[in-house]
Image (cartoon, rainbow, N blue to C red):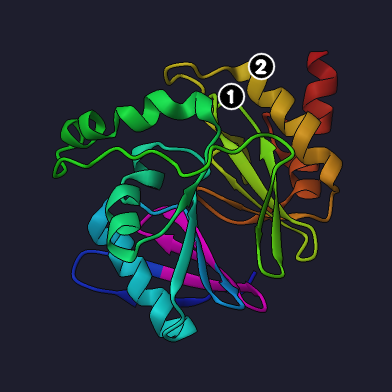
Amino acid sequence: PPQGDYVQDSVIAIAVRPLAPGVYAAKVDYVWTGWVELPDGILMVDAAMNERAAMALADTVRARSGDRPFRYLVNTHPHIDHAGGTAEIAARLRLPVEGPQREDRFWIDQLPQQSVMFGLPRLASFTPDRWLEDGDRVSFGDVELQVLHCPGHTPGHVVFFSAPDQLAIVGDVLFDGSIGRTDFPRGDHAELIRSITGKLWPLGEDIAFIPGHGPMSTFGDQRRYNPFVGDDVLRRGA
């Protein structure tokens, strides 16, 4: 993928990568988020660590996509690095929030405690306007994202797939050369492997994916080279 542009203030660095017409990945510090230009505004994916990071992302979106109104926010999962800014940015920009799947309710409820544990200003929890389930469609005008429930890293983690763009936004399910951690509460390694092989691999080897952290890749490359979930690794472990 193209290396993109870098925007930085005194604290928050944001790297932007155009992926397709009107589709952008944005790395806020070390977390990949993104946005999609809709006919009537902007769809944001994940809201970064806290309010400051989320609002810096919003400023970057405005610089790239103009004064389109912000319309929606969707969440892959509510660990603090991905969803800490959700409550504040949703309130400030008046955004409806969709996702994750409802089994992640307990992680959302713990956001205030997570923020204190990490030495951050106390963050608010939130209640999604819509919990997402496997097979749902998130539709905004001409844009449609397929929802895949992919538990393992968290029990309610969801992946968003755009068939026309051949692009998946996978959060912390899969990385280039690795997979999501499963040592958190209600993490499940075997379930994560089933999510990857049963939900992601059938989408096709040419599908590019944006992970929550690290470089982009394709499912085909991960099937060939990933030491945790590659085809040869899983065959040897069978």
Query: Of the residues shown, which amino acid type is indicated by label 1?
Result: Gly
Q: Quadrant of residue 81?
A: top left
Q: CA distance from mark 1 to mark 2?
A: 7 Å
82 with respect to 10 (left or right): right
Q: Quadrant of the N terminus?
A: bottom right
Q: Secondary structure at mark 2?
A: helix
Residue 135 horizontal/vertical position (percent) = 74, 39
Q: Which residues are magenta?
A: 15-35
Q: Residues within 10 Å of mark 1 (few under 14, many from 20)?
A: many
Most common secondary structure along the magenta stretch = strand
Where is mark 1, residue-wise? 152
Residue 190, numbered label? 2
**Going 69% across and 25% down the picture, which residue do you hit?**
193
Q: Quadrant of the C terminus?
A: top right
- 169 up-or-down from 58: above or below: above
Q: Quadrant of residue 223?
A: top right
206 with respect to 162 (left or right): right
